[in-house]
């Protein structure tokens, strides 16, 4: 709090407006009453963001590409990189990586935090990192066969893509840390089958540090351990009030140790539930569920609210559906929005559309138009984040075969 006040920027003026003139004025139980920051605040301060230190203390800049708006750029100090390396080393360690490990890192290197985040963490752990970055899948398959990595890091959709490019699961891989985009337990089962490894979830966002804000470990019981010693987490409802553990809420993070761009109560737009540590387990950190969705991805169709991940769970529970699917929110007639769900069958697609239609209606109370397309129709993403949801308000169909 004192660092923010000293930096005298947007967050300081909001704190003073809220009656806070010194860090000593605030206790942890009052944190929930303090002002929040949003992505809009960062955009309004583009390109410098809410930098709190002089430029000479900044050693690098990362950010997100800006789907849904302008790019967001985040300045890091050397101390921030140190924190990042530490939380990422912990995440990799939690997945079973050791100094003897070979980490095949297929997250993109660049402004995106995935590639370099894993890189810093693997080096901090003392493992060996293979900086493959995304794409050039043939080369990646070859490297996995020749160098025998035990840990794989990439987006879950690229894990599927890699798995499908191999004739059989590579025997060397033991675990993978997959994140940067939403994925369900049903997707997890597919990745584990294709690659023969334990598929764990890793979460983060550039604004807070990048990957490593929270990560699943072999012993975290399906939830992600939040690196609470660096990032304090809250979950709030649409009015900004705290929700109780187990109730879905928007995640709000406060950076406790960051110096380049410390954030007080950053509203992420990401929705998850929170829980305490696994009872009796040595890890004492609070945990978060896999992300249920984003506040801005919630689909409201004829009064039914649904996140795309819930649709994914229903689709992939049917063994005949390939993990390449696309949800299209058809809003060409605004008053009559339709959800079109485009899937590809892995085997005989006979009767599939009718069965999925029934399953979606029974499980989510949602009537969709299910389109079973030829294998290969849904675009694959080799570099960057998969797009599972498209909004269609005018013009041609985002995918051939949707008109039916
Ligand atoms: O995606 C950081 C990251 C890199 C996380 C590699 C994990 C692995 P951004 O590009 O700033 O940072 O995007 C952040 O991605 O607010 C979520 O909406 C989404 N996201 C990140 N991890 C997950 C995940 C990186 N495990 C935004 N599950 C976040 C679902 C995720 N969504």
Image (cartoon, grey):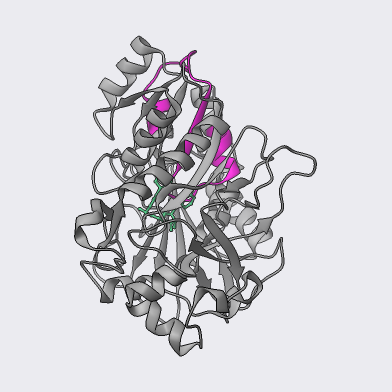
Nearer-the-camera pick, 47 or 371: 47
Nearer-the-camera pick, 177 or 282: 282
Is residue 184 a member of the stretch shown in magenta?
Answer: yes
Residue at the image point whose x is 47% and y is 76% from the top: 36
**Quadrant of image for the C terminus:** bottom left
Give residue 330's position: percent from left, percent from top. 39, 68
Q: Is residue 103 left or right of residue 64?
A: right
Q: Residue furthest right?
A: 280
Give residue 386's position: percent from left, percent from top. 36, 48
Judge whether residue 378 can be spotted in this image. Answer: no
Judge whether residue 142 can be spotted in this image. Answer: yes
Give residue 328's position: percent from left, percent from top. 40, 61
261 up-or-down from 100: above or below: below
Quarter of image, res 139 = top left
Quarter of image, res 27 = bottom right
Residue at the image point whose x is 48% and y is 19% from the top: 173
Residue at the image point whose x is 36% and y is 48% from the top: 79
Nearer-the-camera pick, 14 or 320: 14
Q: How many marks?
A: 0
250 up-or-down from 19: above or below: above
Which range of residues does the magenta coloring cover?
161-190
Nearer-the-camera pick, 375 or 278: 278
Give residue 32's position: percent from left, percent from top. 60, 75
Q: Is residue 309 left or right of residue 247?
A: left
Residue at the image point whose x is 30% and y is 15% from the top: 142
Q: Is residue 368 left or right of residue 114?
A: right
Is residue 200 a member of the stretch shown in magenta?
Answer: no
């Amino acid at each position: 709090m004192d660092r923010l006040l000293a930096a005298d920027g947007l967050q300081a003026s909001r704190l003073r407006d809220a009656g806070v003139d010194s860090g000593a004025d605030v206790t942890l139980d009052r944190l929930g009453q303090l002002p929040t920051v949003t992505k809009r605040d960062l955009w309004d301060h583009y390109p410098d963001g809410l930098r709190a230190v002089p430029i000479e203390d900044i050693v690098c800049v990362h950010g997100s590409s800006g789907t849904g708006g302008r790019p967001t750029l985040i300045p890091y100090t050397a101390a921030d990189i140190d924190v990042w390396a530490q939380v990422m080393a912990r995440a990799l360690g939690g997945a079973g990586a050791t100094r003897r490990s070979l980490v095949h890192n297929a997250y993109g290197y660049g402004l995106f935090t995935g590639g370099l985040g894993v890189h810093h963490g693997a080096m901090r752990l003392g493992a060996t990192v293979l900086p493959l970055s995304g794409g050039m899948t043939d080369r990646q398959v070859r490297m996995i066969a020749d160098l025998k990595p035990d840990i794989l890091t990439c987006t879950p959709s690229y894990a599927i893509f890699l798995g499908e490019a191999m004739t059989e699961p590579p025997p060397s891989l033991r675990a993978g840390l997959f994140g940067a985009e939403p994925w369900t337990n049903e997707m997890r089962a597919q990745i584990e089958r294709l690659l023969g490894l334990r598929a764990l979830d890793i979460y983060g966002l550039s604004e807070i540090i990048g990957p490593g804000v929270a990560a699943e470990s072999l012993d975290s019981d399906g939830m992600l351990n939040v690196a609470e010693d660096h990032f304090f987490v809250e979950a709030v409802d649409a009015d900004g009030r705290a929700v109780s553990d187990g109730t879905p809420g928007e995640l709000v993070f406060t950076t406790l140790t960051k110096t380049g761009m410390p954030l007080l109560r950053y509203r992420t737009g990401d929705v998850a539930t929170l829980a305490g540590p696994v009872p009796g387990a040595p890890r004492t950190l609070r945990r978060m569920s896999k992300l249920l969705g984003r506040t801005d991805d919630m689909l409201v169709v004829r009064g039914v609210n649904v996140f795309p991940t819930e649709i994914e769970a229903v689709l992939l529970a049917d063994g005949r559906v390939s993990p390449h699917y696309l949800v299209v929110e058809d809003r060409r007639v605004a008053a009559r929005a339709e959800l079109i769900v485009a899937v590809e069958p892995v085997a005989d697609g006979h009767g599939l559309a009718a069965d999925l239609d029934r399953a979606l209606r029974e499980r989510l109370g949602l009537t969709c138009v299910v389109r079973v397309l030829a294998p290969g129709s849904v675009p694959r993403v080799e570099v960057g984040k998969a797009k599972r949801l498209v909004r269609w308000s005018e013009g041609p169909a985002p995918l051939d075969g949707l008109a039916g």
